[in-house]
Amino acid sequence: MLRSAQRTALLAASRSGALRTLAENTALLRPVVDRFVAGTTVDEVVAVARDLTADRCVTVDHLGEDTTDRARAAANVDAYRTLLRRLGDDGLAPRVEVSVKLSALGQALPGVDAEKIALDHARQVCEAAHAVGTTVTVDMEDHTTTDSTLGIVRDLRVDHPWVGAVVQAGLRRTEGDCRDLAGPGSRVRLCKGAYDEPASVAFRHRHEVDLSYVRCLRILMDGDGLPMVATHDPVLIDIARHLGRDRPHEIQMLHGVRPREQQALAAAGETVRVYLPYGTEWYGYFVRRLAERPANLAFFARSLLTR
Ligand code: FAD
């Protein structure tokens, strides 16, 4: 993991609108971004998803977080509708589902009805997914949105009980959230958490996050839902495989990260799902991936210098 000050600086940069606009319009960065992002169009992401389904499942994310424009949030819903229709037409559902960020669907809009708009939009995405026989998982963003996001997931599950929730082991509250979410049929993705959170709500040391991850994993594996174990950490994957050996579960990893391990786990009989983002608004997602690993930053710098 990057030293904390570097990670904090990168994560702050991931929220900068000016840097985002500059980066997204710089063609120079594209080849490096391509390692993590499956193109900008539905055709491109569907081609990558189809290849992956040879041995893995997929969850596709249409990039576009932190939308502060209402028309943009509606356009993101249309993008998901188009994507889902295509997944249905190409026979890729249900092995391919979608992930959504509520801040792309209206949760970050100014004004008091932001949450209601996000819920309405998320409902439309769920209906489009249901129509083609696949599922939706609602990504988790920074801690200021956790209550709102879990509330919206609860509302969506009234009509669509298959909607997946995400919890972050880095947050102190998450063991309690796991207990609340571990009921029958509940799909729950457990990740460490990609945002820079204050010590008042989050564990700041890597070891504390890992211990929390194992405690949360035990709760989910002892429950009646479907634990979706999102990590590239080999120790945590081994623990998850041991705890989950006699019950359904998924291992989830990001596109472009440890692909050989993904294939090996699938060959060993694990259900592996790859998180596959696409779209023009890749900046925030990409910078969070850089913040996770120094080698990614070096890879990024090398690609720029050797062009
Ligand atoms: P780490 O301790 O960060 O990494 C363990 C090892 O994995 C590293 O040593 C390295 O070998 C490898 N590795 C990890 N990250 C990278 C990388 N970027 N590039 C190359 N190698 C790497 N976070 C959220 O906050 N909300 C979400 O909704 C969310 N959804 C996710 C969905 C999936 C399927 C996955 C896999 C992650 C998701 N995350 C989400 C991100 C997550 O919270 C972590 O930030 C990320 O997975 C890195 O943590 P790690 O568990 O892999 O462990």
Image (spheres, rainbow, N blue to C red):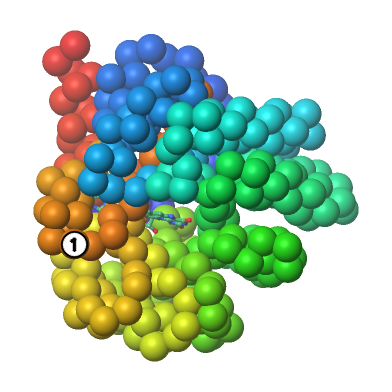
- How packed is label 1: few (under 14 Cα within 10 Å), some, or many (20 or more)? few
| Quadrant position of ligand 1 | bottom left
Instruction: Locate residue 65, reporting x and y percent.
Output: 58, 40
State the image quarter where residue 149 is shown.
bottom right
Who is closer to the viewer here, 80 or 92?
92
Q: Is residue 253 above or below residue 282?
A: below
Q: Give the quarter of the figure containing the N terminus.
A: bottom left
Q: Is residue 260 above or below residue 207?
A: above
- In the image, taking residue 172 as reference, residue 80 lies left or right, namely right
Secondary element at tag 1: loop
Instruction: Locate residue 189, reporting x and y percent.
Output: 44, 65
Instruction: Locate residue 158, reporting x and y percent.
Output: 73, 68
Residue underneath mark 1: 269
Which residue extends farthest right? 112
Residue at figure coordinates x 19%, y 44% from the top left: 259
- In the image, taking residue 177 as reference, residue 288 lies left or right, namely left
Evaluate whether residue 64 shows in this view: no
Who is closer to the viewer here, 46 or 18?
46
Residue at figure coordinates x 31%, y 41% from the top left: 53
Three-letter amino acid code at the position of disc 1: Gly
- In the image, taking residue 250 as reference, residue 184 lies left or right, namely right
Residue at figure coordinates x 34%, y 48% from the top left: 57
Instruction: Locate residue 287, reporting x and y percent.
Output: 39, 39
